[in-house]
Structures are given as C-alpha cells and as structure tokens.
Amino acid sequence: MTMHPTLQSAFANRCALKVISGLNNFDRDRVAATVKAAHHGGATFVDIAADTTLVQMAKGLTNLLVCVSAVEPEKFVQAVAAGADLIEIGNFDSFYAQGRKFEAEEVLALTHQTRALLPNITLSVTVPHILTLDQQVQLAEELVKAGADIIQTEGGTSSNPTHPGVLGLIEKAAPTLAAAYEISRAVSVPVLCASGISSVTAPLAIAAGATGVGVGSAINQLNSEVAMIAVVRGLVEALGTVTTSGAIA
C-alpha cells in the first residue's frame, strides 16, 4: 500500500491534522460545515461517515483527502468507489453512550474483514480506550500485522476533568495522550492521537510520540463557521509551533 504523498509528508513532519465530523453524523449541512472549516482552516484531511452521498459532497467542497469511518466493512467499498481516499475503522465515541463496546477481538476481526475487501486502500484503525494500556499496545501491534497503516488512539470519553481552563483540557486529553505514548513506541506506523484533543494538548500529543492529531467535537459542535475555521487554524498553528521549534526530533 502506498500512502498519499500529502498524508505521508504530514506524518513525516509530525503535523497531520484530521478534522472529524463523526461516524454517525449524517446531517448534510453539519458535515458540509465541518468540511469547509477543515478546508479553509488548513487541515490535512477530513473524516466523515462512510456514506456515498456525503463522500461526493465532500469531494465537491474540498481538495483535502477524505477519510470515511465505519464499523461495518462493507460500507467502505461503496464509499471508496464514490471517491474516499482512505478509511478508518473506529471513531467509537458515539457508540459508548449507547452502551456499545468494542473489544480487541472484534476490532481485529473488522480489520481482517476490511483488508480482505480492500487490500490496497490506506487503512486507519482506532484502538478502543476501554482496554488497559498494555492491551491497547498489544492490539495495536496485531492491527499493524493485519494491515493497518495508521493507528488512532482515543480516550476523551473516559476522562472526567475536575478543573476548568487549561488544566481541564490537559485532564481531558490525558487518556489518549497516554495511549499515544505507549503505542507509538511499539509500532512503526503513524499514530494519530484523537478524542479530547485541543490546541492546548495537540503539541503534547506530538511530544508523546504521535505524528498527528484528530479533532472532532471541539470543531463540529460550534454553530459558527467562522468559529470552526478559527479552531482549525489554531490547531494548525499549535502543531506548526511544535514542529518548527525543533523540540521534536
């Protein structure tokens, strides 16, 4: 599998930014607003639900790479045919509120099924935060062996910040930062740190070993496109400050 040069370069420079609209978000207007914010804000790529109509819309709104997310492998086939550039098994956050959990065995099985259907597409897989850190590392290693090209961490829903402001933002990101630290030292593929990330904690994710970040609710829950673009730009600047400072080897 050959990764798209734009994505490969962003990972190599440890500044990839994925803007996530949500695996279960099929609201055309909301998805469009998120895609536009990603485009005008300077993100690397966008992540939308694996829906052919949404893919076609996104491709008409931006020249950014379009990633699609699902937990049903067959949905990827149609989405890729519609123009999706890469695929993601995961963004599980929306399922946790419904009491739906993804164990290691199921995520690994989904990866094998997806690779059988689409052997050549760039594949990202999320490691569930419900697993202990050592289990997350073990699963990440198995996912890479099964064909995952990118590993994504999560953990925002498992944190319960007790402080406001910057301290609260760091508390919220702590679980996914810890996962990025441990997993990035165990696998050779890019690690995308997602779930609970902000402009405050994006640089911490890179310092922890991630090669990029994924941000969703901090952007797509806003009601103003101007505000959404501003958040994306803030994230791009935060990542750029880290990579140009020489703090990251």
Image (cartoon, rainbow, N blue to C red):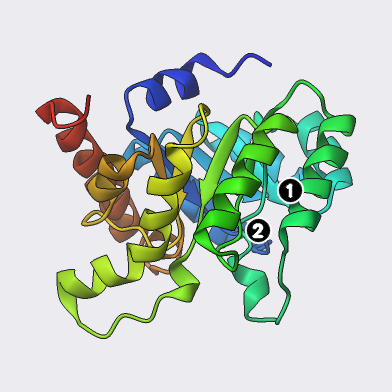
Mark 1: amino acid: Ala
139 shown above or below 14: below
Q: Residue at x 53, y 46 (%)?
A: 152
Q: Position of residue 210 (x, y in %)?
A: 38, 39
Q: Toward the viewer: 189 or 23?
A: 189
Q: Position of residue 72 (x, y in %)?
A: 83, 52
Q: Can I make out residue 78 in this image?
A: no
* Mark 2 vs 1, N-terminal side: 2
Residue highlighted by disc 1: 50
Q: Is residue 6 above or below residue 134?
A: above
- Tell me how far mark 2 sits from mark 1, CA to CA: 7 Å
Q: How far across and how far down the image is residue 153, in percent?
A: 50, 52
Determine whether 129 is above or below 89 in the image: below
123 displayed left or right of 200: right
In the picture, the quarter occupied by the C terminus is top left
Placement of 126 over or under 12, stated as above or below: below
Residue receiving disc 2 = 23
Q: Amino acid at mark 2?
A: Leu
**Which residue is pictured at 78% across the width and 42% down the height?**
111
Dot 1 lies on which element? loop
Whether pointer 2 and pointer 1 mark residues with C-beta atoms closer than 8 Å, the reply is: yes
Mark linked to residue 183: none
